[in-house]
Image (spheres, grey):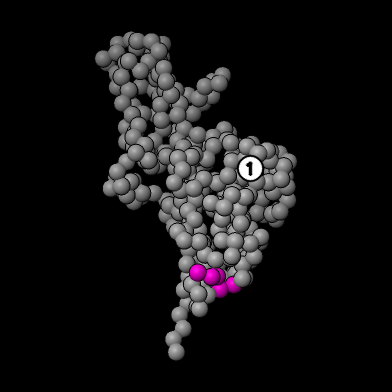
Amino acid sequence: MSFSITYKTLCEITVLHSYFLNSGIEEFSGMTDVKKGKMLKNYKYKNFLEIIPSEATAKLLRNNHLVFIPLHNSIKIGVKAHPDNEDVTFASISLDTTLDFIIRIKDYLFENYTAISPTSQQLFYISNIKPVDEPVSFKYIPLASEAVFINDDYKVSDVSTAKILDSFGTNEKTGIFGVVSLKMQADNSNLNLLSPLQEIISPTPTFKIHFDNRKTFWKYSKTNSTFEVETTLEKPLTQNGFVEITPADFTTSPPEVNDFQYPNPSVSSIQKIASKMYSQIFI
């Protein structure tokens, strides 16, 4: 008689950021699979974000034979399958079970290169269940197949924020930026983690947390000179590649136009003037 233990993937959450994955003006989503592989080779979401189970969820994982598996560009939740039927979980997981994961920012420049408003008291809440105090326009966690970015629309109200934070311990709330909350049975069936019969879903439910890179107006200045020009359009900030700037990109024709090169800005030089975000570059 043989006995084997099998774990299957309950769900996966891909975590992407365009600042690290785009190349200049070329967007990651439009790249070939070969180039996407190259961009992902040195990419790790853990360089800028921490995503961990809440204390209550860590206990739920242990008690229900679930495992939290952080990878370079995704998170997987594994589940122990029943030895007599691999479509069924080993533990009888209630369809009301909710898994919460806390998000914290690790890179102090994150907001500089991410297309979100400066952090407020409101939480980013990325979930397959709408909180009771949120409007019908609540944005659910995107599927991996959807071309959707996590932006300010994923912030919940002050009322919802307070209620969500009340569910966490004091230490857990420290530095919290957002929460990923996944219930076994979602508001919409395509976001379920388990079937209504408590069976493992195939193909695996795969969600996506994708932050877009910030775009700014680029302002060039020359030290000890009145020289100053800015771009007419916002330009993308990226870690990789190069965005070519020519005199035609500026609001006014630069003086001594042929005497200068126009480098891409650092993400550390962001400033807001009126309603516009600028990157300052000295040449």
Closest to the observer, 67 or 192: 192
Residue at coordinates 66% horizontally, 60% vertically from top-left?
A: 96
Where's the N terminus, which quadrant?
A: bottom left
Name which residue type carries label 1. Answer: Leu
Residue at coordinates 32% horizontally, 41% vertically from top-left?
A: 31
Q: Is residue 196 above or below residue 115?
A: below
Q: Which residues are magenta?
A: 87-91
Residue 24 position within the rendered picture, expressed as x and y whole percent measured from the top left: 34, 33
Residue 82 position within the rendered picture, expressed as x and y whole percent measured from the top left: 52, 75
Question: Is residue 72 visible to us here?
Answer: yes
Residue at coordinates 50% horizontally, 34% vertically from top-left?
A: 115
Residue at coordinates 49% horizontally, 39% vertically from top-left?
A: 149
Closest to the observer, 65 or 221: 65
- Residue 103: say if magenta: no
Question: Is residue 102 visible to us here?
Answer: no
What secondary structure is found at the residue carrying circle 1?
loop
Closest to the observer, 20 or 279: 20
Give the labeled residue for mark 1. 123
Residue furthest to the left: 258
Residue 171 position within the rendered picture, expressed as x and y whole percent measured from the top left: 67, 54
- Residue 90: say if magenta: yes
Residue 164 position within the rendered picture, expressed as x and y whole percent measured from the top left: 69, 49
Near mark 1 (Cα within 10 A), the count class, few <14, some 14-19 or many ≥20, is many
Left or right, 192 with reference to 164 = left
Where's the C terminus, which quadrant?
A: top left
Left or right, 223 with reference to 60 = left
Q: Is residue 107 above or below residue 228?
A: below
The image quadrant that residue 161 belongs to is: top right
Closest to the observer, 102 or 174: 102
Left or right, 28 with reference to 143 = left
Residue furthest to the front: 197
| Majority secondary structure in the magenta region | strand
